[in-house]
Amino acid sequence: MRGGLAERRDANASEPRGARGNRRRQAMRWLERGAVALASLALSILLIVLASGYFTAHDRATIAPQPSQLGRAFTDQGDVLLAAGAPAPRYDSNPPTSGPHRFAPIRRDRARLTDNQLLTALAAGDVVIFYGARKPPRGLSALARALAGPFSPGLAAAGEAVVLARRPGTTGLLAAAWTRLLAVRSAADPALRAFIDAWLGRGAARGG
């Protein structure tokens, strides 16, 4: 054993210093190449993740739109009830979203509404969705039922109804809440559901 150890020591001692230095430099180069390869792989994975929209999708899921961002806002013109025979005021939007009106409850949906019916419903907290065709477009009735249940006069009087209303000349859908209007192309637009969720039940007396 001692003889073998001595022979190895002699061999290492007899090896040129230059050869040992070359091996060290080669080992360092392999380590550097390995580090560069690992860094390149990590960068490639990061770029793929960013390109796939992973972080964007998660940000959208965790940051919900604020109610103030849903729909166009109009000045609150109040909900004073007009006396019989009093002239209607000039509203700041068409259809109106607030303002003095005569009390006129909605008895059925899927019909044309007067301004008085509309403002009575919005002041109570209902959301009214206008469409231009003879019948509600695809998906709209199902959305209204899912978010508020079937229409009834009692539900509308309580300010908890999603009222569907004909409005000839309307392109797409026009959703109205107290002091708010939102135009969308179809019932499948996520903004419509968000609008209803945000404003249903929030009429003139409840922070509309």
Image (cartoon, helix red, strand yellow):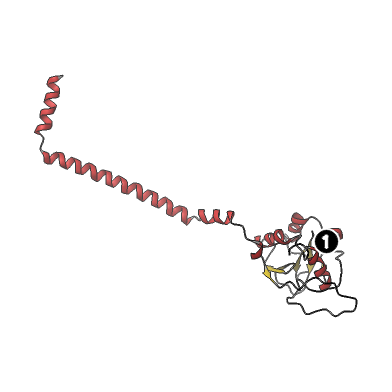
Q: Secondary structure at mark 1?
A: helix
Quarter of the image that includes the C terminus: bottom right
Residue at 51%, 54% in the rendered image: 55
- Tell me what residue is drawn at x 44 percent, y 53 percent: 48
Relative to residue 119, is residue 10 depicted above or below?
above
Is 193 situated left or right of 99 in this image?
left
Disc 1 crowd, CA 10 A, few/some/many (<14, 14-19, 20+): many
Residue 113 % position (x, y): 82, 70
Query: Image quadrant for the N terminus?
Result: top left
Residue 161: give x, y in percent of width and height. Answer: 79, 60
Spot occupied by residue 14 in the image (x, y as percentages of width and height): 9, 33
> Is 27 placed above or below 121 here?
above
Q: Nearer the viewer, residue 201 or 48?
A: 201
Q: Which residue is mark 1?
A: 156
Callout count = 1
Q: Is residue 206 left or right of residue 6?
A: right
Placement of 97 over or under 4, stated as above or below: below
Where on the picture, by quarter, is residue 47? bottom left
Q: Is residue 124 at all visible to an observer of this figure?
A: yes
Q: Is residue 170 left or right of residue 8?
A: right
User: Residue 57 location, x and y as percent?
Assistant: 55, 55
Q: Is residue 177 above or below residue 145?
A: below
Q: Residue furthest right?
A: 84
Residue 114 seen in the figure: no
**Observer-nearest of 193 and 69:** 69
Taking the spot 59% from the left edge, 56% from the top edge, the residue there is 63
Residue 73, quarter of the rendered image:
bottom right
Furthest residue toward top = 1
**Amino acid type, mark 1:** Ala
